[in-house]
Image (spheres, rainbow, N blue to C red):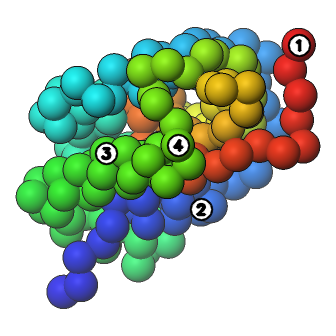
Amino acid sequence: MKKISFLLVAFILWFSFNACESPEYIPQKYVGKHVFDILTTLDTLDKDVFRTHFMTLDEIKNVLEEVEVSDEFRDKASTMDIDTYNKDIDRIYHDITQEAIDNYVHLSQIEYLNYEYKATPNNTMIGYTGTLYFKTNDQIFKMKVYSMEFDDAFGLLGLGRLKREEERTFE
């Protein structure tokens, strides 16, 4: 059986949500700072420690029992093993590091600007897609952040797509 990339799992899960209005109170506002702190220490952060910032595979499988997703997706995600999952998180680590190199960004020297997000409820879970904005060398960059709240738990699903932001300004 073909292995599923973690990002593919996160994206499919995200796009499988039923779109609804966002709830009034969302503690998600703290996620941007949390991800920012992860990024600024990424050059010294061990991959095993990096993995601890993401939802565990068991947590994801438990959430899938409660939310509305296609049977095909549920079957693929439920058969994912821990080695595949860890490799996918390691790929996120590698991709962020490589994207930073490609964009001449020294992550230890970035400055936090803003975090914007959109919530999509699905049964007892809320999925979030966000954009973290940061600055370095007078240039603004952005990175996508995917996360969820389930009951009283929170977890990151994915990070990536570091790009220079040409259209936004922050003061």
* Residue beneath the point at 32% across and 36% down: 55
Amino acid beneath label 4: Tyr
Left or right of 117: which side holds 153? Answer: left
* Residue beneath the point at 37% across and 45% down: 97
Amino acid beneath label 1: Glu
Q: Mark 4 points at which residue?
A: 104
The percent position of residue 51, horizontal first and vertical second, equals 23, 36
Q: Name the residue under label 2.
A: 16
135, 47: nearer the viewer? 135
Measured Cα–Cα span from mark 1 to mark 4 = 23 Å
Q: Mark 3 points at which residue?
A: 93
Measured Cα–Cα span from mark 2 to mark 4 = 35 Å
Mark 3 against mark 4, which lies toward the viewer?
A: 4
Mark 2 against mark 1, which lies toward the viewer?
A: 1
- Does residue 145 appear anywhere in the picture? yes
Measured Cα–Cα span from mark 2 to mark 3 = 25 Å
* Residue beneath the point at 29% across and 29% down: 43
Residue 171 disc label? 1
Amino acid beneath label 2: Ser
User: Which of pointers 2 and 1 lies earlier in the amino acid sequence?
Assistant: 2
Mark 2 against mark 4, which lies toward the viewer?
A: 4
Label 2–label 1 contact, CB within 8 A: no
Left or right of 26: which side holds 124? Answer: left
User: Which of pointers 3 and 4 lies earlier in the amino acid sequence?
Assistant: 3
